[in-house]
Amino acid sequence: YRTGNNIGIPAPAWIDNCQFLEGELKEETGLDIRLPVDIAGAEVLLVPPSADNFVNTDTMLGYAKVFHAAGISWTTSTYADEAANFGLFLDYRNMKTLNQRIIEAARRLKVKLIVFGECGHAWRVAMFMKTLNGPLDFLRTPYPIHICEFTLDLLRRGAFRLNREANLARTVAYHDPCNIARAGGPIEEPRALLRAAVLDVREMPENTIRQQTVCCGGGGGLLTEELMDLRVAGSRMRAEAFRTTKANTLATICAICKAQLRKALPKHGIEAEVVGVHDLVGRALISSTAGEKVPARW
């Protein structure tokens, strides 16, 4: 309620880290790729989990590369810089109050679209934004859009190209976060992005994926060091399913799943990198095909 995110990041720290990541992008690509903050009149308000700006930074860089390549104006908000809604674990009142911040930020900045980043329970709440705090009639669409849907649409309409050989050393298996796959969120879109960005994409057993996905073991508020034994036990089914693929990389679109599986997989004797889908998209993105803006279809 004080800072707009669940780990107490003040606005100057959010801005500073966005500027730091812009420097990283300049060094990597030679391009002036921006991570805009509090830009009134931008087309898109991106609401990522705060972890993407401080821990899963390759995911944040992937978002920035996509918007830059498509020529789409976007911004984050220091008033609502956290996609995660922990009201989901508490009660309806808290869930509604936290969700309202995002809508207020979108109104203040006069954006046309709200796009959510890679966060599981954030998206579970986002799907009910209109019910919680609607109507969203000031937006071009009266509902938020998931970043995987947004990016895949741009890719299919030629906003940029992906070079799968940029991820040549990776064999990748995808983990469906419970709060997305079980709640009717994007299932095929992240897979389509992975196939476009990676040469070798593998599936885990059918009874552990899509709507039948198994928990990472860190959901529901369990992601604390004090509960590590419980987290390891809870992650066993996912770890064993991943082991069958013999992949060296696990990709997912949930910040909690990423944090959990990075700790849990080694406890099961599995050494693998855990990344976001947009980490791999960002690494494979090589150019805009036309050098012109490709508007979002929404």
Image (cartoon, rainbow, N blue to C red):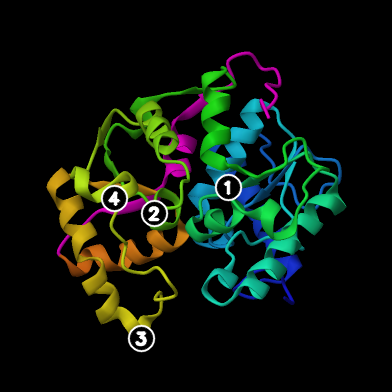
Which residues fall within the magenta stretch?
269-298
**How far across and how far down the image is residue 55, in percent?**
50, 61
Tell me the kind of residue under disc 1: Glu
The part of the image, by quadrant, that contains residue 287 is top right
Which residue is tagged 4? 212
Mark 2 = which residue? 177
Q: Few, some or many C-alpha atoms within 10 Å of disc 2 (few <14, some 14-19, many ≥20)? A: many
Marks 1 and 4, Cα distance to the nearest angstrom? Answer: 38 Å
The image's mark for residue 24 is 1
- Mark in front: 1 vs 2: 2
Q: Which residue lies furthest to the top in this view?
A: 290
| Label annotation for residue 226 | 3
Residue 125, visible in the rendered structure: yes
Instruction: Give the label, 3 or 4, closer to the camera.
Output: 4
Q: In which quarter of the image is the N terminus?
A: bottom right
Amino acid type for the residue under numbered disc 3: Glu
**Marks 1 and 4, the one that precedes in the sequence:** 1
Q: Is the residue marked by circle 1 packed among few (<14), some (14-19), or many (20+) residues within 10 Å?
A: some
